[in-house]
Image (cartoon, rainbow, N blue to C red):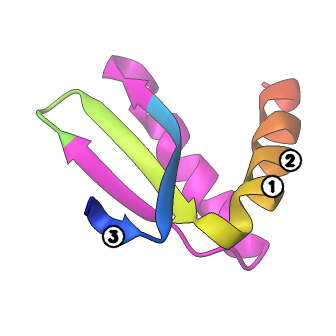
Amino acid sequence: MGLFGNRWVAVRTETGSRTDVIDRLQALFKSHGIKSKITFEGSTLKRIHVPKKEIERARELIEAFDKEQ
């Protein structure tokens, strides 16, 4: 069983100076009612996880977010 069991899936990973993207994605998910969790590996790797049932909505939001960048 993974860190959050099998209910959570990592949808984005960033490293280095781009880790702020994860924080902005978490704010976007929250504004759309999607729960999320952030994990760290070392001091430079950051991941955002969403519940399995929210993967499609999260991916749509990430796609729109990336187009704006």
Callouts 1 and 3 close, C-beta under 8 Å: no
**Which amino acid type is marked by label 1?**
Glu
The x, y position of residue 48, in whole percent, is 46, 50
User: Is residue 22 a member of the stretch shown in magenta?
Assistant: yes
The x, y position of residue 6, in whole percent, is 42, 66
Position of the C terminus, as image quadrant, is: top right
Callouts 1 and 2 close, C-beta under 8 Å: yes
| Residue located beneath label 2 in the image | 60
| Residue located beneath label 1 in the image | 56
Say few, some or many: other residues with alpha carbon within 10 Å of mark 3 (under 14 / 14 to 19 / 20 or more).
few
Q: Answer left or right for 12 relative to 3.
A: right
The quadrant holding residue 16 is top left
Q: Which residue shows up at 71% across the image and 67% down it?
A: 54
**Which amino acid type is marked by label 2?**
Glu
Callouts 3 and 2 close, C-beta under 8 Å: no
Dot 3 or dot 2: first in sequence order is 3
**Residue range (magenta):** 14-40
Dot 1 or dot 3: first in sequence order is 3
